[in-house]
């Protein structure tokens, strides 16, 4: 069992945000289990009622928000009676027996967990509960309930057996939120950083290895920080699971003052992404730099746009992962240095345009239901893309591309073919006969 908690409610907007979190539709199920000591019947009004009561005191953050978590298997054994028993035990340990509270049960991915919001101010005495050593109290309650209900014991910082190393979380809550938002998992960035670390002998070599894998080193508030290709900062010692002194020793030839700030790196990443986003309504290939942007697009845009969820599903079915950005487009993580940006009728590649990457784009276009395609980019990219499209079964029709001589020869196409508004994929063409 893991119990967390923090003070909230410094103003009306913060209280409203907390209420929205408690009622979030991201959960499969939300149940208001109990409202205690308040006259209101809704979460929003109950929390605001608690805040209003505190206005007669000097308390700046009047609410204490706690969560009680158990494993998915153990959550099946947690009845409402048990949840309320855990809430009462925690409230007593924190010195908030008799205080107003709201208890909410969330069910997410099949696992139930409990949220409690107390008013730190007692409704009768208007005295504010002291929450010193609250983390230790959380652990003490967790250990008692684990023993009482035969739950899996969790090693805590304050209640670990003597001689046991201090436990360290694999990821903070903000790390977890970032990985959910960007699709870049903690395991993935840890593995990449470990490869860079193992292949380098000093700071400069580590810097270069990270750069080759789209990771930037930046200057953070407490030292050197790694920023992944999605813009999320990471603690290098935490991701490598080694001591900070060891990291400082190996990277001693790098001066953090010579590195850009985390904010500067994130700004560049955001700018690069914005500049690489191509509007779906672009029809003239001269409207952008063809030599810098490579990709494919649907010959005739569909009347009804494909939903971002369906776009992402077509990639997931191929075995890739990605995420939907705020503008509704989809970013796909194809490899360590390659990503795809898919807006439904156009896919651009960001990173090395290998034949394998091009083939993945073509497969995605076919999965989207495209009937014919166009290419944009440099001549090498287009010729390789055409060849791969022609070798698909059935061949993927390509429009508006003039074959170079070397490709005509390879595919045994006559020299007088010229520009082909549609691909050479009919039943009587030389290419199909050669197959």
Image: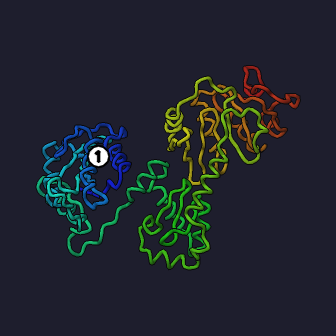
According to the image, what is the colour scheme of the structure?
A: rainbow
Which residue is at 37% across, 61% downward?
170
264 to the left or right of 49: right
Which residue is at 63% across, 47% downward?
274
Q: Does 134 appear above or below 316? A: below
Outermost top residue = 427
Residue 371 vs residue 146, the one in the foreground = 146
**Where is residue 77 drawn, in percent x and y?**
17, 44
**Where is residue 434 drawn, in percent x and y?**
74, 29
292 to the left or right of 37: right
**Where is residue 85 drawn, in percent x and y?**
13, 50
Q: In the figure, residue 296 lies in which quadrant?
A: top right
- Residue beneath disc 1: 48
Outermost front residue = 56
| Quadrant, the N terminus | bottom left
Residue 151 vs residue 428, the one in the foreground = 151
Q: Does 107 appear above or below 132? A: above
Q: Does 314 appear above or below 128? A: above
On the question of residue 112 being in view, the answer is yes
Q: In the figure, residue 124 lies in which quadrant?
A: bottom left
On the question of residue 383 being in view, the answer is no
177 to the left or right of 286: left
Q: Secondary structure at mark 1?
A: helix
| Quadrant, the C terminus | top right
Instruction: Determine crowd level at label 1: few under 14, some 14-19, many 20+ residues with C-alpha closer than 10 A.
Output: some
Outermost left residue = 148
Which residue is at 57% across, 70% downward?
206
Q: How many marks?
A: 1
**Where is residue 53 drawn, in percent x and y?**
24, 51
Which residue is at 38% across, 56% downward?
173
Q: In the figure, residue 141 lies in which quadrant?
A: bottom left
């Amino acid at each position: 069992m893991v119990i967390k908690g923090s003070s909230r409610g410094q103003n009306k907007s913060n209280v409203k945000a907390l209420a929205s979190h408690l009622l979030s539709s991201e959960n499969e199920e939300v149940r208001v289990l109990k409202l205690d000591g308040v006259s209101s019947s809704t979460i929003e009004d109950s929390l605001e009622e608690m805040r209003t009561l505190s206005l007669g005191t000097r308390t700046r953050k009047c609410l204490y928000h706690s969560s009680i978590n158990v494993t998915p298997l153990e959550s099946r054994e947690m009845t409402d009676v048990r949840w309320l028993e855990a809430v009462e035990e925690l409230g007593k340990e924190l010195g908030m027996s008799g205080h107003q509270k709201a208890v909410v049960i969330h069910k997410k991915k099949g696992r139930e967990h409990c949220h409690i919001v107390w008013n730190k101010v007692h409704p009768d005495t208007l005295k504010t509960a002291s929450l010193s050593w609250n983390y230790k109290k959380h652990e003490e309650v967790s250990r008692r309930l684990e023993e009482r209900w035969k739950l899996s014991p969790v090693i805590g910082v304050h209640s670990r057996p003597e001689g046991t190393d201090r436990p360290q979380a694999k990821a903070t809550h903000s790390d977890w939120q970032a990985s959910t938002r960007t699709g870049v998992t903690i395991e993935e960035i840890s593995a990449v950083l470990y490869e860079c670390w193992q292949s380098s002998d000093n700071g400069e070599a580590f810097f270069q290895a990270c750069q080759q894998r789209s990771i930037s080193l930046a200057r953070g508030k407490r030292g050197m920080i790694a920023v992944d290709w999605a813009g999320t900062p990471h603690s290098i010692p935490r991701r490598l699971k080694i001591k900070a002194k060891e990291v400082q020793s190996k990277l001693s030839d790098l001066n953090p003052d010579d590195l850009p700030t985390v904010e500067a790196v994130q700004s560049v990443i955001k700018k690069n992404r914005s500049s690489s986003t191509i509007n779906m309504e672009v029809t003239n290939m001269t409207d952008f730099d063809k030599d810098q942007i490579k990709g494919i697009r649907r010959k005739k845009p569909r009347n009804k746009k494909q939903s971002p969820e369906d776009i992402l599903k077509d990639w997931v079915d191929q075995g890739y992962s990605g995420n939907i950005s705020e503008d509704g487009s989809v970013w796909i993580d194809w490899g360590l240095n390659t990503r795809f940006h898919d807006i439904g009728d156009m896919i651009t590649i960001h990173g090395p345009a290998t034949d394998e990457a091009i083939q993945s784009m073509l497969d995605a276009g076919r999965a989207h239901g495209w009937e014919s395609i166009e290419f944009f980019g440099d001549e090498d990219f287009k010729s390789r893309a055409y060849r791969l499209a022609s070798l698909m079964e059935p061949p993927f029709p390509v429009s508006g591309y003039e074959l170079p001589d070397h490709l005509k020869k390879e595919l045994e196409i006559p020299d007088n073919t010229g520009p082909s508004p549609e691909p050479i994929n009919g039943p009587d063409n030389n290419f199909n006969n050669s197959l």
